[in-house]
Image (cartoon, coloured by chain):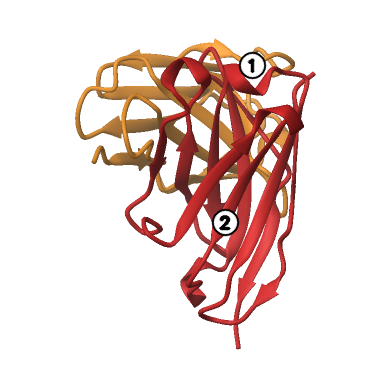
Amino acid sequence: EIQLVESGGALVQPGGSLRLSCVVSGLTLSDHYIDWVRQAPGKGLEWVGRTKNRSQRYAIEYAASVTGRFTISRDDSKNSVNLQMNSLKTEDTAVYYCVSWTAGDPTWGQGTLVTVSS
Amino acid sequence: DIQMTQSPSTLSASVGDRVTIACRASQSINSWLAWYQQKPGKAPKTLIYKTSSLQTGVPSRFSGSGSGTEFTLTISSLQPDDSATYYCQQYNSYSYTFGQGTKLEIK
């Protein structure tokens, strides 16, 4: 069974930084794409970024709203994917989910809450 | 970027009804479409992937269809537990966009 567990969410001031982690089990991480998706309070789902698999040379893509501020990294030996968030804005307040993709089939983590407020 | 438009935004139906939610893409996404169910305070749950493949454990009353730019999620016989918000997502190309959601309530 594939499981994803996010951690690292917290209250942070505008302009601050935070690092989220997603630990994956039940799959070989190097073979899979991992997305980060967020959901602001009372709003819909927004795709944030993606790290592709080894065969795609671990290519990374970001949504325009976070490009230059957020960085995705992965450590296949630890089965983890990280989301480094810098220069945080109040509009980055959201629950952040990681999502794994297996042959076009997505599996979601339970999410971690990031609150950006002074 | 590809835009995804769901309709309706809200829907009220009775137990046993057949319910259909539509999702339209601004350009062809082939069959790379997923449907999710989300209940308040919970993570989204995958119902359907690749347009019509039912994820393991999802009740067979849920089905998906479509191709190109027009897609549909159907619940064949609505159950009380189906009250939730439903989202579609295209994963054919960047930026893997979601529809705005359809809130389904049970009368």
Mark toward the viewer: 2 or 1: 2
Give how far across and how far down residue B62 sits, in percent: 59, 19
Rendered position, B42 above or below A10:
above
Res B55 label: 1
Residue at far bottom of view: A118
Q: Are marks 2 and 1 in contact (CB under 8 Å)?
A: no
Local crowd size for mark 2, using a 10 Å CA cut-off: few (<14), some (14–19), many (≥20):
some
Which quadrant would the C terminus of chain B be assigned to in this image?
A: top right
Q: Which mark is residue B30?
A: none
Residue type at mark 2 is: Gln
Give me the disc on residue A84.
Answer: 2
- Residue A95 pos. (x, y %): 63, 57
The colour assigned to chain A within the rendered structure: red
Q: Quadrant of residue A27 in the image?
A: top right
Position of residue A90 relative to residue B84, above or below, is below
Q: Which chain is orange?
A: B
Q: Is residue A114 above or below residue A97?
A: below
Camera-side residue of A61 and A48: A61
Q: Which residue is rendered at x = 64% and y = 25% of the image?
A: B16
Within 10 angstroms of label 1, few (less than 14), some, or many (20 or more) residues?
some
Q: Amino acid at mark 1?
A: Gln
Numbered marks: total: 2
Q: Chain of mark 2?
A: A
Q: CA distance from mark 2 to mark 1?
A: 31 Å
Q: Secondary structure at mark 1?
A: loop
Q: Residue at x 35, y 23 (%)?
A: B71
